[in-house]
Image: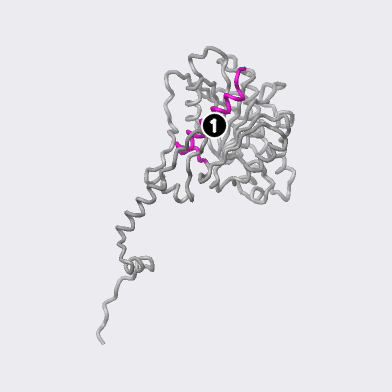
Amino acid sequence: MEEQTPQPRRSRFARGLKKTGIGLVTLLVVGFVTVRTMLHANPGEGNEPPAGYPSTQLIKLAFVTGQLKLVDMELAVPDTIEFREGIEYGKGGNTSLKLDLYLPKELKEPAPVLMFVHGGGWSKGKRSDYRYYCVKFAEQGYVVATISYRLRDIALFPAAVEDTKCAVRWMRVNAAKFGGDSDRIALIGGSAGGHLAMMTGYSADDTEFEGTGGNANVSSRVQAVVNLYGPVDMTTEYARNHGLITGYLGKSYTEAPELYKRCSPLQFVTADDSPTLILHGSLDELVPITQAERLDKALEKAGVEHEYYPLKGWPHTMDAAQVVNDYCMARMMDFFKKHLSAE
């Protein structure tokens, strides 16, 4: 019997292609064209959100293939905006708490103040992460700030909440010095920053969170809250077993269930809370969209004025994509015009 020359092994997928007569190159071309067409997200019209994707894998592919444009995180500050960096707004223990300001130079009357709170799981992130939003909103005539706060390696909950409230108190005292209206302040945050914005916005009457950072006896109440994919209920099974949350709280749910309730913005929702804008992606694998749904229902039940925009087919930090950022900016602009108007 004649010895057979060993043949290279083909995958079942490749053998199937050979049987059907479809070449690999042809398949790749067809696949690329199909994916390219599918990944061109519809930017949306009016209040319609941009079309999303079937999976996070396709979102990653869209980015790799250049179909999905991201925002410019290093956006230059135009000459029409004054940038003030590293202003101390208070003290968190021995930690200097700082913020950056983006100030329109041609203000003719006091402007609404927007304060951004960065995300990062309470363990990382920096205030400059919101540079893009800050520049864009300052160009629209808003006085804008972005704040730092104590991360969990420095201090656990409720330190970051205390710091955020301290920043609001500082702003209320100082806003008029650079053209801001201290009676028209909004807090905006994404992920952990959204959590801090909600905690501050919904706990204005809770003196325990006021801390000692500075400007005692000044109100930390704000006139509007924007929550971008932030967690609202730390008592769910998913939340109480997540490393970011247990690390932030420093104790397990079994050890301190009341601590998890205390860290949940949902627990503080009352009828007198600030109007709230909610934006959340359905493909969020870090903070499930069910969190936004819980908040929507709680605000509705309490009679708090709010708007909820679920974005189908978008993940966590979805507004890093230019098309989603444009949509979020438009919704925020409408929201601020409605709730921060001087009239």
Quarter of the figure with the C terminus: top right
Q: Which residue is mark 1?
A: 331
Identity of the residue drawn at 42% across and 19% down: 79
Residue 54, position as x, y percentages in the image: 48, 50
Residue 233, position as x, y percentages in the image: 67, 43
Tell me the SS state at disc 1: helix
Query: Which residues are drawn in magenta?
Result: 317-343
Q: Nearer the viewer, residue 208 or 250?
A: 208
**Left-right relation of 327 to 5:** right
* 327 in the magenta segment: yes
Q: Tag 1: residue type? A: Arg
Is residue 75 shown to the viewer in this render?
yes
Q: Would you identify the image quadrant in which residue 265 lies?
A: top right
Residue 81, position as x, y percentages in the image: 46, 19
| Residue placed furthest toward the left | 2
Q: Would you identify the image quadrant in which residue 303 lies?
A: top right
Quarter of the figure with the N terminus: bottom left
263 lies above or below 148: below
Is residue 263 shown to the viewer in this render?
no
242 lies above or below 142: below
